Image: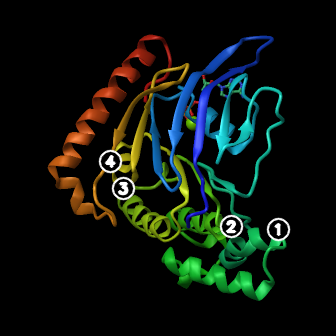
Amino acid sequence: MGNGGSISVKEATKVYDPDGAKVLALDRCSLEIGPGEFSVVVGPSGCGKTTLLNAIAGFHELTAGEILLDGQTLSSPGKPAKPGSDRIVVFQNGALFPWMTILENVAFGPLAQKKMTVPEAREKALKTLETMGLTLIAQDYPGQISSGMRRRAEIARAMMCEPKVLLLDEPFRALDALTKIVAHQFLMEVYDAQKPTVFFITHDLDEAIFLASKVYVMTTRPASIKKILDVTLPRPRDYRLLASLEYQRLKAECQDAVREEALKAFSAGEREM
Ligand SMILES: Nc1ncnc2c1ncn2[C@@H]1O[C@H](COP(=O)(O)OP(=O)(O)OP(=O)(O)O)[C@@H](O)[C@H]1O
Ligand SMILES: [Mg+2]
């Protein structure tokens, strides 16, 4: 897309409940995500991944530090959080309107923002649904389709707004292994077509390496970045890559780093990964 989308996280610190329990979720966490990079974040449960995603989305204010999008401050102490249509979040538990058809759901964003006419939004929604392999269910309601299709429809809805940044918090967590493979393939296709900057959280290391340009391994809470893995596997990606030596090497490296942090979290009394 070539419309920017670089994210700079500079010493981001987040303390929840500062006057009470004082939960330190992020501790001077820094990372630089380039425009169009597919960044995947892994780390022990409860380490602060969603906290970081929510700060980038503008859902809450940082306690210290700063987050910038293309050099403009998104989040810093004293700056009220401000979500924007340049950063779209796809949540873990789904958020399609059950009373609208899939086509209506997907067309909703640009219509609500008055950025397109109804025929324009409809045409674009149909094209986006086609890219996600969902043409046949365009007139169905969310309750009538499988959970894998619902997740894909949500990504289609997010992509309709042509966001600079797509923020995904374990979007495929509830899918079975085969449905996940299909969802990955379609996500890769829309990513290759639009090249938004992606911030994708997962606990699934195969998913992380298959999708990522870079994998960020977070430390146990309070989160900072422990390790960055460059995933230079060629795109478009194909599942046969999983058998390659380079893939196996990356997975072992990632596993070692995550396991070390998960064990620390476990011994500190946090939940396991
Ligand atoms: N609104 C809140 N108020 C107080 N504490 C919170 C709040 N949200 C999160 N926390 C705490 O901050 C820490 C980080 O939470 P966060 O949800 O960011 O972790 P996570 O890495 O996304 O975990 P998971 O992998 O389980 O989704 C946890 O200890 C959590 O209990
Ligand atoms: Mg989370």
Q: Is residue 183 left or right of residue 55?
A: left
Earlier residue among tags 4 and 2: 2
Instruction: Estimate the spatial distance between the alpha carbons at disc 4 and disc 2, rounded to whole Å.
Output: 28 Å
Under mark 1, the amino acid is Gln
According to the image, label 3 marks what residue?
177
According to the image, label 1 marks what residue?
113
Earlier residue among tags 2 and 1: 1
Instruction: Estimate the spatial distance between the alpha carbons at disc 3 and disc 2, rounded to whole Å.
Output: 29 Å
Name above or below for residue 218 compared with residue 56. above
According to the image, label 2 marks what residue?
161
Query: Disc number at residue 231?
Result: 4
Instruction: Estimate the spatial distance between the alpha carbons at disc 1 and disc 4, rounded to whole Å.
Output: 36 Å
Dot 4 falls on a residue whose secondary structure is loop
Dot 1 falls on a residue whose secondary structure is loop
Q: Nearer the viewer, mark 4 or mark 3?
A: 4
Can you give x and y, in whole percent of width and height, for residue 273 in the image?
A: 43, 30
Under mark 4, the amino acid is Val
Can you give x and y, in whole percent of width and height, for residue 64 in the image?
A: 70, 22
Instruction: Estimate the spatial distance between the alpha carbons at disc 4 and disc 3, rounded to whole Å.
Output: 22 Å
The reply to whether residue 100 is in sight is no
Earlier residue among tags 3 and 1: 1
Labels in figure, total: 4
Can you give x and y, in whole percent of width and height, for residue 214 in the image?
A: 40, 45
Q: Nearer the viewer, mark 3 or mark 2?
A: 2
Q: Are marks 4 and 2 in contact (CB under 8 Å)?
A: no
